Image: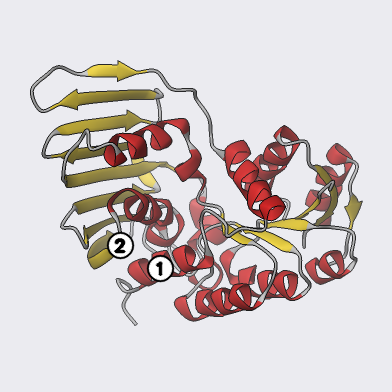
């Protein structure tokens, strides 16, 4: 079966989804965006048909799968529509702009025969795959700490939808640390305790632009998950330390290193990737084999619950 894809929301992240589909030999035949110029540009690049709305694209019967790359406030409407029409969904994170909306998406996914997969692409990075294998093989022993940070200076963030609570649902925690929470759950297991501190530096916004979430897993692993849009220097790394070893990955340099408790640091060669092609490859496999996605709506909802519990009502 030759699968055909559509893209809902033609912003920057959609370009990476499109490249991932191309890498997997999936043709993008339909696009839509509330910004006509963005839709025209993507349509011209991929030879796709432009639809006036997500609903029109989904109900056209022309696509088997869609990437939903819209702001979080629009996720529920488009995802539920696609699932109700049997169209498979790759949904950008976070799952929604609040927990209630994320729960309704989960319910729709449970009732649908279509696959819904959350776009937590970091799970598919070669370095993260290697870290997971070292944990599963027992090379680190019982996990003690996971430290993860994604930060840098995001220009003009106060003028973008990311910094508008009514659209995004939150700031750095919900946008950036959504990946971190999912990574922690993937590597260390379910989160049973969470706390957060956050700050606001940008004027004219109503969401946090710096945050640190501390978490604890069911097995006792502790995590520190940091994010910022206003840090002068970019940092992106994950450091996992167990009783018997430690493994650390620097996203900026693509350096993965491992150190046993009694031994020296050893560099591990890994391919550099942003994970989009691998993520879409997994999505396609789930569709083709009629199996559950690697990252489900349950995962997306749980990340929302962990993060949003730290926001003041």
Relative to residue 101, is residue 10 drawn left or right?
right
Q: Earlier in the sequence, mark 2 or mark 1?
A: 2
Mark 2, other Cα within 10 Å: few <14 / some 14–19 / many ≥20? some
Question: What's the residue at 75%, 57% (across, down)?
Answer: 65
Check the picture and name the quadrant holding the C terminus.
bottom left
Whether residue 278 can be seen here: yes
The location of residue 41, given as percent across then percent down, is 83, 44
Give the CA distance from mark 2 to mark 1.
9 Å
The location of residue 97, given as percent across then percent down, is 51, 71
Element under disc 1:
helix
The location of residue 119, given as percent across then percent down, is 56, 53
Question: What's the residue at 22%, 52% (across, down)?
Answer: 223
Q: How many marks?
A: 2
Closer to the camera in the image, 156 or 182 = 182
Rendered view: 214 above or below 307: above
Pointers 2 and 1 in contact (C-beta within 8 Å): yes
The location of residue 168, given as percent across then percent down, is 52, 66
Closer to the camera in the image, 245 or 302 = 245
* Mark 2 vs mark 1: in front: 2
Question: What's the residue at 64%, 70% (across, down)?
Answer: 74
Q: Name which quarter of the figure residue 143 lies in.
A: top left
Q: Name which quarter of the figure residue 112 lies in.
A: bottom right
- Indicate which disc residue 302 carries: 1
Mark 1, other Cα within 10 Å: few <14 / some 14–19 / many ≥20? many
Rendered view: 168 above or below 186: below
Relative to residue 169, is residue 313 drawn left or right?
left
Relative to residue 132, is residue 215 drawn left or right?
left
Element under disc 2:
loop
Rendered view: 236 above or below 217: above
Q: How is the image coloured?
A: secondary structure
Residue at the spot of label 2: 190
- Indicate which disc residue 221 carries: none
């Amino acid at each position: 079966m030759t699968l055909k894809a559509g893209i809902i929301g033609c912003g920057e992240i959609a370009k990476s989804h499109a490249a991932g589909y191309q890498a997997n030999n999936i043709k993008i035949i339909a696009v839509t965006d509330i910004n006509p110029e963005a839709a025209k540009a993507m349509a011209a690049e991929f030879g796709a048909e432009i639809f006036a709305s997500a609903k029109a694209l989904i109900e056209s019967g022309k696509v088997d799968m869609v990437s939903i790359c819209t702001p979080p406030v629009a996720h529920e409407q488009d995802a539920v529509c696609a699932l109700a029409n049997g169209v498979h969904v790759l949904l950008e994170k976070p799952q929604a702009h609040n927990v209630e909306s994320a729960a309704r998406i989960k319910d729709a996914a449970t009732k649908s025969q279509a696959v819904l997969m959350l776009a937590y692409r970091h799970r598919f990075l070669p370095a993260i795959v290697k870290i997971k294998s070292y944990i599963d093989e027992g090379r680190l022993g019982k996990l003690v700490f996971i430290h993860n940070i994604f930060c840098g200076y995001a220009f003009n963030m106060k003028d973008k939808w990311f910094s508008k609570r009514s659209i995004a649902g939150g700031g750095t925690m919900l946008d950036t640390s959504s990946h971190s929470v999912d990574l922690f759950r993937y590597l260390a297991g379910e989160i049973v305790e969470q706390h957060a501190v956050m700050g606001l530096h940008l004027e004219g916004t109503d969401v946090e632009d710096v945050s640190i979430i501390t978490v604890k897993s069911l097995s006792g692993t502790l995590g520190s998950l940091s994010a910022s849009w206003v840090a002068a220097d970019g940092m992106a790394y994950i450091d996992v330390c167990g009783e018997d070893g430690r493994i650390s990955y620097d996203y900026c340099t693509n350096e993965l290193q491992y150190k046993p408790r009694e031994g020296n640091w050893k560099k591990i060669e890994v391919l550099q990737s942003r994970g989009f092609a691998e993520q879409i490859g997994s999505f396609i496999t789930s569709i083709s084999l009629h199996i559950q996605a690697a990252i489900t709506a349950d995962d997306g909802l749980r990340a929302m619950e962990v993060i949003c519990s730290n926001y003041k009502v």
